[in-house]
Image: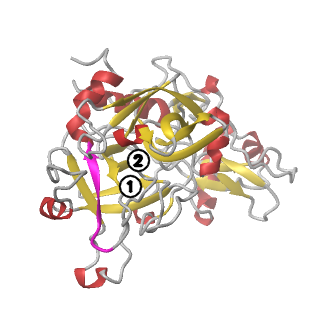
Amino acid sequence: MLLKLIINLCLVVYSVVSMYEGDRCIKKDGTDVGTCTIVTNCPAALEELDLGETQPQICSFPSGNRDPIVCCFNNPNNSKRTTQRPPIAPSRITNEQPRCSPLHQSTKTKQVAFNKCLEYQEKYVYPCVRGTALTGGYGRANYCHHASDQLVAGGTNAGRDEFPHMVLIGFGDSASNLGFKCGGSIISERFVLTAAHCSFSPKFGYATFIAIGVLHRDEAKDQSKIYSIKRFINHPHYKSPSKYDDIALIETDREMKLDQFTVPACLPTEPVDDARAIATGWGATHYNTQPTDILQKVILYKTPVEECSRLFRSHRLFRRGFNEETQTCYGDRELPTRYQDRYESKDTCPGDSGGPLQIKSKKIDCMYIIVGVTSNGEQDCATPHSAGVYTKVAAYVPWIESIVWPQYSF
């Protein structure tokens, strides 16, 4: 039966566009809507295979020889549409050992942030789940929602759960009446990394809440996604309105509910290839426009230090000029200079502040590393020859570790 299941599914995979587990899928004839699910967790698909009359509709084949993901419908004979993503049953995730082999045998280091990155990957991206293996026992699920880099070009909508660490920072007296003006990144169960200047707005007051697991701004109305801010910890050297040491940590009032859709990002603990990075945020997409409703993503290129120094000379926000030890800048430099005057540059804009500049980890699969925090989204963003300033996270990792994981810090 199990061998037949694998062979049959291999025969039909060619005709369906790959989708991740948890994605919504539509029946080929358009009569029903289902959810991409591991085949062994879908009774309807197993029944189809057992009867041998029809074949389940494939979403994708995960890497690592894991079970196929199929489009699962509540009832093959029921045309009622289901648009809600089914919740993950907590009982399916286990910490019991040794149920699954460790993902990393000897890669842990003395660097707390790196070890935590490994822990979050194993716990939320490739968790040990009962029923994943074809034998019905424990196996590692594949909850990686990363998209390929070629999908990120010129600034475009992010995919559902593609950046599961993203956070909206809200200003207001109550969770039901918030204005979201900044972004941030989940880095642990209780802490978010953001920009220090996001702690206070002259117009809206102090930051009071965060929203997690959000793709569209209006999803932040869901109270289950809202957490109160217990502490907004600016770096001790930060002095408003200066852009130096513009980095902060938010501690939430309680642990955030982390799962495959809400996964912490990692911190840089060693030199990385950051010549190209991905910026994400809900800020304006063009100069002098309103913030966007849906999370945006864009590939940016590292700007040479000499040009950063020229662009950000000494003035009110940069009294000592550009500081290459604690700051970096990125913009759009992929087109030849002769074309850039006729080209709308890629950049971060007002509303993106505090959000991450990230790269995909080459050592820890399906995890992002936050290399920068958006600090200077100027009003003339996304114009030719412009670049944005980002706080260089690597310079602040010891400070972050001492607050987020004090029990492990030396």
Q: Are marks 2 and 1 in contact (CB under 8 Å)?
A: yes
Q: Report the residue at 49% width, 38% height from top.
A: 205
Q: Quadrant of residue 368?
A: top left
Tell me if residue 387 is in the magenta stretch: yes
Magenta-highlighted residues:
384-392
Percent across and percent down for residue 101 are 42, 26
Residue that protrudes farthest toward the top in the picture? 407
Question: Judging from the image, what secondary structure is the residue with disc 1 in?
Answer: strand
Q: Amino acid at mark 2?
A: Gly
Pick the front one: 267 or 43: 267
Q: Pointer 1: what residue?
A: 279
Percent across and percent down for residue 212 are 54, 38
Q: Amino acid at mark 1?
A: Ala
In this rendering, the count of numbered labels is: 2
Q: Main secondary structure of the magenta part?
A: strand
Q: Report the residue at 50% width, 54% height from top.
A: 282
**Looking at the image, can residue 86 be seen?**
yes
**In the displayed structure, would residue 163 be above or below residue 304?**
above
Percent across and percent down for residue 30 are 78, 63
Tell me if residue 293 is in the magenta stretch: no
* Horizontal arrangement in the rendering, residue 60 relative to residue 287 (left or right): right
Q: Residue 355 has which mark?
A: 2
